[in-house]
Amino acid sequence: MANDLELTPVAGGTRLRVRVKSGARKSAIGGAHGGALKLSVAKVAEKGKANRAVVELLADTLGLPASAVTIVSGKTSQDKVVEIALSVAAVCAILVALEPPKKR
């Protein structure tokens, strides 16, 4: 999954494209979708609730405070770009660790 994502190094961290499905049964990280990380959040897309849920999900998954994850574009779209205060290598390592083992 991590190898299929478009991770861009920027000053102070990494930019990552995400595709969000709001109003899902539960919040979870899916696989890759066209270079973006698929996320499902239980909150609905009204008054910024889903955006806050995206930030919280990514922060919890990456072991960071919510202040270390920022939505930089796409606040009203399901396609977003987030900036994470971690290096590309660190983000990749965490996402690779989340992948289920490959079946033989």
Image (spheres, helix red, strand yellow):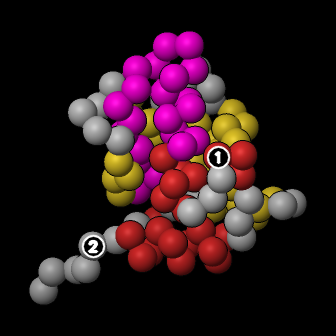
Mark 1 or 2, which is nearer the eye? 1
Q: Does the magenta stretch include residue 65?
A: no
Q: What stretch is highlighted in magenta?
A: 32-56
Residue situated furthest left in the rendering: 104
- Residue 89, quarter of picture: bottom right
Which quadrant is home to the C terminus? bottom left
The numbered mark, 1 or 2, whose residue comes first in the sequence reads 1
Determine the secondary structure under disc 1.
helix
Q: In this view, does 26 lie to the left or right of 51?
A: left
Q: In this view, does 77 lie to the left or right of 102?
A: right
- Residue under pointer 1: 66
> Please, what is the three-letter code of the amino acid marked with disc 2?
Pro
> Please, what is the three-letter code of the amino acid marked with disc 1?
Ala
- Residue under pointer 2: 100
The crowding category of the residue bearing disc 1, from other C-alpha atoms within 10 Å (few below 14, some 14 to 19, many at least 20), is some
Give the number of the disc on residue 16. Answer: none
Determine the secondary structure under disc 2.
loop
Which quadrant is home to the N terminus? bottom left
Q: Is residue 84 left or right of residue 55?
A: right
